[in-house]
Image (tube, grey):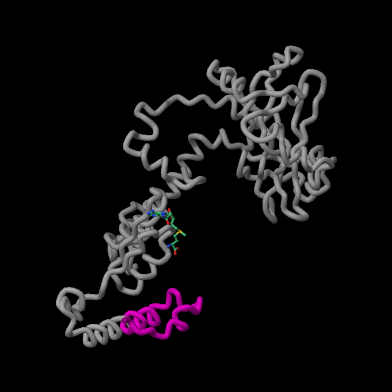
Amino acid sequence: MICEPNWNLLLAKANTTNETVLEAARAEIWQSWRRSCAENVDHPRAKELFDRHKLPGFHDPFAGGGALPLEAQRLGLESHATDLNPVAVLINKAMIEIPPKFAGQPPVNPVSRDEIARGGRWNGKGAQGLAEDVRHYGKWMRDEAEKRIGHLYPKIEITAEMAEERPDLKPLVGRHLTVVTWLWARTVKSPNPAFRDVDVPLVSSFILSPMADKEAFIESVVEGNSYRFVVKIGIPKDAEAAKNGTKLGRGSNFTCAMSGSPISGDYIKAEGQAGRMSARLLAIVAEGDRGRVYLSPTAEHEETACRAVPDWRPTGDAPPPHWRNMCALWPSGMG
Ligand SMILES: C[S@@+](CC[C@H](N)C(=O)[O-])C[C@H]1O[C@@H](n2cnc3c(N)ncnc32)[C@H](O)[C@@H]1O
């Protein structure tokens, strides 16, 4: 068995990138492996299993985010990672498979190449050249995406009017906050003949944040033949109703926000199949100075989203046929 080197040294946060400490740990692993080989010299498969010139490989069959294979690789072991989830596989490829292929190579992006040409040799170690390229082309992709589709993701201006009913917004008045999420509700035409032209929302909960001292929820305010959503801070008067949104018990039944009439799952399915489902903006979640800021939807943001018309659609199957079995196995939240 491999003996324990002084892991405390390695575990100290300051040492996680200290090459001297890592080198000492690598040497310790080799020493420990040679001891194991010596102890197992009589093993019937000693030549194959206890080769003192070749460290055993490391395999994490449930690698997830790849922390263990990455550390094993940093400690000099041949590292292998597998996972059922394609996202985990992608992360592990990016962490342990691709970087070693570019170890010691200079960056190839034009800016770095010009700099190298001016200053002579590239002195970067390990995957630093690849990291330069990832930063350069990552920024290019970000900037290009902003140019092409940035107008579809507007910031939200906090106005004095918004802060009138929301004292928590006062310090943010005049600021343009980055939106992190637009929360939408699917809608169907109300099954109640009195409101048959109204698209009513199917919402499984009106609670935005249940966190103590940061509670936020959505109120649906009915005005004549229409309704609007207002985001409120604090605990709702009828917490149970807010928790249930427009949902009616378990299953896929809802209630009409205008009339209280029940909306059955079968009705929703039929409306969907008839192409009569739509959507309404429920709330906007923006980045504040100290976490998320929940805001009422604005007409401008709702219209911006509705104006977005894709000029391209995937032509193949999505997901591709060979992924279908995998999708069925993906843990919830990953699909
Ligand atoms: C807790 S995470 C792994 C954490 C990781 N080993 C670490 O220490 O950081 C568990 C992983 O196992 C994967 N997994 C679950 N069942 C699996 C299976 N039958 N085959 C392969 N991977 C599986 C999941 O996709 C998930 O990424």
Vertical position of residue 235 compared to residue 151: above or below: below
Please state the horizontal and vertical placement of residue 203, each as a whole percent of the image: 67, 33
In reply to whether residue 15 is colored magenta, the answer given is yes
The mark total stands at: 0
**Where is ligand 1, by quadrant?**
bottom left
Please state the horizontal and vertical placement of residue 295, each as a whole percent of the image: 72, 40
Kindly identify the residue that appears in the image at 80 percent across and 29 percent down: 221
Q: Is residue 126 left or right of residue 233?
A: left
In reply to whether residue 289 is colored magenta, the answer given is no
Kindly identify the residue that appears in the image at 82 percent across and 23 percent down: 223
Q: Residue furthest top?
A: 193
What secondary structure prevails in the magenta region? helix
In this view of the protein, which residue sits in the foreground, 263 or 195? 263
Q: Is residue 121 left or right of residue 147?
A: left
Kindly identify the residue that appears in the image at 42 percent across and 26 percent down: 312
Q: Is residue 96 left or right of residue 227?
A: left
Please state the horizontal and vertical placement of residue 165, each as a whole percent of the image: 84, 40
Vertical position of residue 297 compared to residue 180: above or below: above
Q: Kindly indicate the quadrant of the structure image that contains residue 141.
A: top left
In this view of the protein, which residue sits in the foreground, 307 or 12? 12
Kindly identify the residue that appears in the image at 36 percent across and 29 percent down: 317
Q: Is residue 52 left or right of residue 214?
A: left
Q: Kindly indicate the quadrant of the structure image that contains residue 241.
A: top right
In this view of the protein, which residue sits in the foreground, 12 or 312? 12
Please state the horizontal and vertical placement of residue 91, each as a whole percent of the image: 40, 54
Vertical position of residue 132 compared to residue 312: above or below: below
Q: Kindly indicate the quadrant of the structure image that contains residue 239.
A: top right
Specify the quadrant that holds the N terminus: bottom left
* Numbered range of the magenta stretch: 1-28
